[in-house]
Amino acid sequence: IHDDLDLPVGTIKMVFGRGSGGHKGVESVMRAIKTQDFVRIRIGVAPIGKKNQAKKLKDEEKVIKHVIGKWRPGEETTAKKAFKKAAEAARLFVTDGIESATQFANTR
């Protein structure tokens, strides 16, 4: 389970066997276990831009400030709902398997 700047705040996606997308923590895990074949739950942390899409932060300093900074008004509530959904997806993965968990996680 990890944060993802390619997804808007509050969005979660469950994926298997995908690349890191530039996420340093995921890259570290892949190097350590020598594979990308594992399940991940991505939790969106990108600011919401036009059409409710993830707003791209181009400057590294802005990325760092955003990721470790405080939530904007309304984002914290949205993020907490996503955290609960991610926890339920993880529970479903353990109890019911990847198909059920992925369907739950990837449905709005």
Image: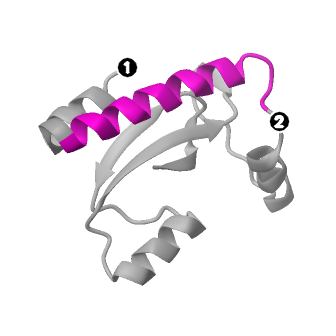
The residue that mark 1 highlights is 108
Is residue 72 among what the camera can see?
Answer: yes
Q: Is residue 66 magenta?
A: no
Mark 2–mark 1 Cα distance, whole angstroms, equals: 25 Å
Task: Answer above or below: position of 67 versus 45.
Answer: below
Question: On the rendered structure, is 12 left or right of 67?
Answer: left
Q: How many marks?
A: 2
Q: Secondary structure at mark 1?
A: loop
Magenta stretch, main secondary structure, is helix
In the displayed structure, would residue 81 be above or below residue 55?
above
Residue 55: which quarter of the image? top right
Residue 106 visible in this rendered orientation of the protein: no
N-terminal of the pair, mark 2 or mark 1, is: 2
Numbered mark located on residue 70 in the image: 2
Q: Quadrant of residue 36?
A: bottom left
Which element carries disc 2, helix, strand or loop? loop
Residues shaded magenta: 71-94
Q: Position of residue 24 (x, y in %)?
A: 59, 69
- Figure quadrant of residue 97: top left
Residue displayed at 51% across by 40% down: 43
**Quadrant where the image shows the C terminus:** top left
> Mark 1: which amino acid?
Arg
Q: Which residue: 32% across, 34% down?
A: 89
